[in-house]
Image (cartoon, helix red, strand yellow):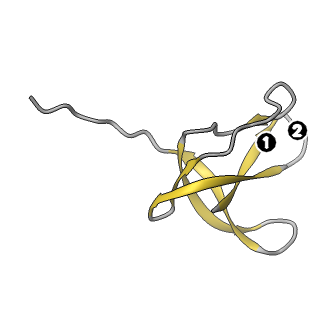
Amino acid sequence: MEIYVFLLDEGTDVWRPVQAEKIGDNLFRIVSVNPDPENEKWQFSTGEIVKCEERSLSNSNKCFVAIEKIWITYKTWA
């Protein structure tokens, strides 16, 4: 599924479409790899789980945008 990730240090609002795996209600794991990390800084990285919300970007189409990194803690039971 395609979601959008905010690009940092661009001087204006820029969103990059990336591929993500849906893992829950509005929760996605980013699976795309940034092909040019030296020149394009994603707000969230490959493998991170993010919360998304539906928004209308400049093209007026509704899409999911990543708004928050989700920290998941795993417990080991002995």
Residue 36 lies in what quarter of the image?
Answer: top right
Q: Residue furthest bottom?
A: 61
Most extreme residue toward the top is 38
> Mark 1 near mark 2, Cβ–Cβ under 8 Å?
yes
Q: Quick one: quadrant of the C terminus?
A: top left
In which image quadrant can residue 20 be found? bottom right
Front residue of 60 and 24: 24
Q: Which residue in the structure is indicated by mark 2? A: 10
Separation of marks 1 and 2 at Cα, in angstroms: 7 Å
Q: Dot 1, how many residues are within 10 Å of its Cα: few (below 14), some (14-19), or many (20+)? A: some
Give the residue at x 84% y 49%.
Answer: 14
Q: What is the three-letter code of the residue carrying label 1?
A: Leu
Total number of numbered discs in the rendering? 2
Q: Is residue 70 left or right of residue 32?
A: left
**Residue closest to the eye, 11 or 77:** 77
Judging from the image, what secondary structure is the residue with disc 1 in? strand
Marking on residue 7: 1
Q: Amino acid at mark 2?
A: Glu
Neighbours of disc 2 within 10 Å: few (<14), some (14-19), many (20+): few
List x then y, in percent, for residue 47.
55, 39
Residue at the location (61% across, 46% down)? 31
**Does residue 33 lie above or below 38 as drawn?**
below
Q: Position of residue 16 (x, y in %)?
A: 79, 50
Q: Secondary structure at mark 2?
A: loop
| Location of the N terminus (image quadrant) | bottom right
Give how far across and how far down residue 70 sits, in percent.
47, 44
Which residue: 83% across, 74% down?
60
- Residue extending farthest left: 78
